[in-house]
Image: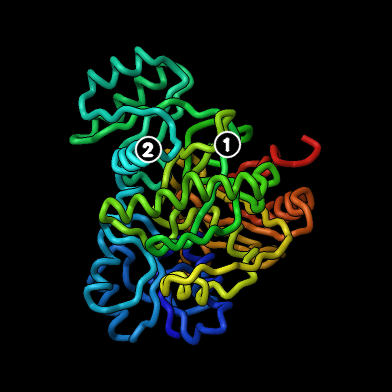
Amino acid sequence: MKILVIGKGGREHALALACSKSKLCTQLYMAPGNPGMAKIGTCVNVSDSDVDGLVAFAKEKEIDLTIVGPEATLSLGVVDAFQKEGLKIFGPTKAATQVESSKDFAKKIMAKYNIPTAAYETFDDYEKAVAYVKEKGAPIVIKEDGLKAGKGVTVAYTLEQALEALKIAFDIPGNKVVVEECLVGFEFSLICLVHNDVVVPLQIAQDHKCVGDGDTGPNTGGMGSYSPVKKITPEIIEHTMNTVMVPMAKAMIQEGVPFTGFLYGGLMLTDAGVKVIEFNARFGDPEAEVILPRLESDFVQAILDVMDGKKVELKWTDKVSHGVVLASTNYPASSTKGAVIENLDAVDALVYHMGTKEVDGHLVTDGGRVLMITTLEDTLEKAYEHTYKEVEKIQCSDLFYRHDIGKKDMEHE
C-alpha cells in the first residue's frame, strides 16, 4: 500500500514511523514532513494547509490510505475533500472536527448526552463573562473557543489571572469563551481509533501541559509524556470507555456528525469519578510519541479494520515508554528559530522531530517545540533515567526542557 501522512511535527513523525513498520506499507509519503521523517520515507513539498495540493498529490500517486496528523488541516475540511474524490482517508470531517475546533460544540454534546465534564458557561460578551467569573471566583478555567494548538487555555488560580485571560480572549474580534469549573485530580489521555460506533482504545498516556517543573507556568502543547500510567487501572479505563468514549462516538452519530479518526479524550480522575477536560479530533502530541512505540500490532491493519467496522484487539509491549520535549527558549510565548542542534547522532533513543529544519547541512530549530526523546524500559524509573541521560547529550544554546516528566506517577512518590 502507498500511504500518505499529512503533517510535519512530532506526532506525524510517530505516525509515519508506526506506518513504516507495517507489512502492508510499500511506499510512505509525508506532506510536508521534516528532516527526521525524511529518513523513513519520502517528504513531499506540499503544505499541510494546501488541501487542493494534497488531494492532487494523492490522486497522482494513487495513494491507498491517508492519515491526517494536525487539527488545523482537519478543520480545513481535508477529509471532506478526499472523500469527494473517492480517496481513503482516516480522520474526521470538518463538521466532526468541531469536537475540537469548537469547545462550545463539544460541551453542548456532553451536556445533552450526560457525558461527565466540568460545569461551564459560554460567553460572547466580555462584561457578562467578567460578571460570571467574579460570581464564581477562582480557581476557574478560561478557554478560548476555537483551535489554539493546545494553548488558549488558562487555569486561573486567582481572580486577577482569570480577568486578564478574559481581556486577552475578548481582544480578539468575534471570539467566544468557555468558562468552566476547575477540575482537580489526576490527568490522563485516552485516545481511541474510531469509525462511527466502533471505538478501539489505545494505551493510556499522561501529558505534561505546563511549561515548568512541578506543573508551573503557562499551558503549552505538551512538554513530555509517558505510557502506561500506573494510577489509571484497567477498571478505570473500562469505566471511561463506557461513560465517556463510547457514548461520545454514539452521540456524534445521533447529532449527524459521525466521527472517524483518532478521538482524543483529555480526562481528569477526580474524587467524583472520571470527567472530560476536552476532546480533540486527532492523535495527541506528545502522546503519539510514547503510545505508538509500545504498539506491537500492525498499525495500518488496525486502522483499515476499524474503517471496515471491525472491533480489533491490539497487542502492546509491557515496557514503559517515557518522552521529554526539548522546546525553544521563551516557548510558549514565542519560539526561536535557526539555533544549531548538535550531537543528535550520539542519542541512544527514539528521536522525534517536532520543529526542525536543515540549513546548509546543519539541523536547526524551527518552532516552539523542537525535539522529543523517547525511551522504552521495564519500569518508569528506568525509562525516566534513560531519557534524561540521552537528553543531556543534545547540544543547542536555545533549548530547554522539564526535568520531572513522569515523576508524580513513580512508586516511591
Residue 332 in which image quadrant? top left
Q: Secondary structure at mark 2?
A: loop
Q: How many marks?
A: 2
Judge whether residue 361 can be spotted in this image: no
Residue at 29% x, 85% y: name it.
Answer: 60
Residue at 74% x, 50% y: name it.
Answer: 380
Relative to the observer, which residue lies in front, 39 or 117?
A: 117
Q: Earlier in the sequence, mark 1 or mark 2?
A: 2
Q: Amino acid at mark 1?
A: Leu
Residue 128 in which image quadrant? top left
Q: Residue furthest top?
A: 135
Judge whether residue 348 can be spotted in this image: yes
Residue under pointer 1: 269
Q: Where is the N terminus found, in terms of image quarters?
A: bottom left
Relative to the observer, which residue lies in front, 313 or 79?
A: 313
Residue under pointer 2: 152
Q: Amino acid at mark 2?
A: Gly
Q: Disc 1 vs disc 2: which is toward the camera?
A: 1
Marks 1 and 2, how far apart in space?
A: 22 Å
Q: Secondary structure at mark 1?
A: strand
Viewed as shown, does residue 69 lie left or right of 399? left
